[in-house]
Amino acid sequence: MSKKIVIICGSPRKGGNSETLCDEFMRGCLDAGHQAEKVLLREQQINYCQACYVCRKGSGCVQKDDAAAIQRAMVTADVIVLATPVYFYSMSGQMKTFIDRCIACGAELSDKAFYFIATAADGKQAMERTIDALRGFTDCLPGSQVKGVIYGAGAWQLGDIQGNPAMKEAYQMGKAV
């Protein structure tokens, strides 16, 4: 059965290592017959959450930016992929800002399957805090399940991910969705 997948890439760098793994994951999804779209947060206008909680009253977010369209894509997706480079042992600012804005749609994201992709110059252990932070988001979504994590270790400079075992893993995990 074909699934709808939305891949949200938090890399600020065009063609960066995280984005490259997103592309491999997406290629696997498409080869398996699924629908997949990639959202590049760096190309979106997403403001910080103002913690006004108007959205919690059912009125939607008071901010009129690109976050709502991405949230709608997440709500209609079967599978959500969150990808980020690791900066100072945490996710990119682009990803964190977007996740904070998801308070407006959190209740609609129940029972979703999630995959995480992280890249870092260091090894897998250096990425665990980032993965824990992403899990902190999904832990707030009833019935959500983290189905897989891809660690792009040893990837700092642009293109370092090429030839990395994470490339094959991303493709295979996307194909197995």
Image (tube, rainbow, N blue to C red):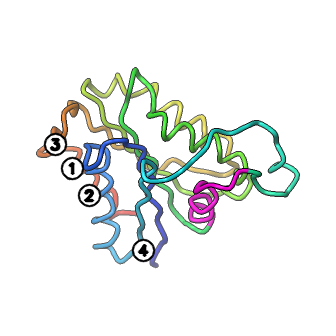
Q: Depth check: give the residue in front, 132 or 89.
A: 89
Does residue 56 appear to the left or right of 77 in the view shown?
right
Q: Earlier in the sequence, mark 2 or mark 3?
A: 2
Secondary structure under tag 1 reads: helix
Residue labelled with disc 2: 24
Rate crowding at label 4 as few (under 14), some (14 to 19) or many (20 or more) other CA atoms within 10 Å. Answer: some
Residue labelled with disc 4: 35
Query: How far apart, in angstroms, are the residues tagged by discs 4 and 1?
Result: 20 Å
Secondary structure under tag 2 reads: helix
Q: Earlier in the sequence, mark 2 or mark 1?
A: 2
Q: Residue, x 14% and y 46% (percent of image)? A: 162
Query: How far apart, in angstroms, are the residues tagged by discs 2 and 4?
Result: 14 Å
Image quadrant in which the C terminus is located: bottom left
Does residue 55 appear to the left or right of 29 in the view shown?
right
Q: Nearer the viewer, mark 3 or mark 1?
A: 3
Q: Which residues are magenta?
A: 63-75
Query: How far apart, in angstroms, are the residues tagged by discs 3 and 1?
Result: 11 Å
Does residue 103 appear to the left or right of 21 in the view shown?
right
Residue labelled with disc 3: 159
Q: Nearer the viewer, mark 2 or mark 3?
A: 3
Query: How far apart, in angstroms, are the residues tagged by discs 4 and 3?
Result: 26 Å
Q: Earlier in the sequence, mark 4 or mark 3?
A: 4
Please tell me whether residue 168 is drawn above or below residue 95 in the rendered image. below
Does residue 116 appear to the left or right of 133 in the view shown?
left
Q: Earlier in the sequence, mark 2 or mark 4?
A: 2
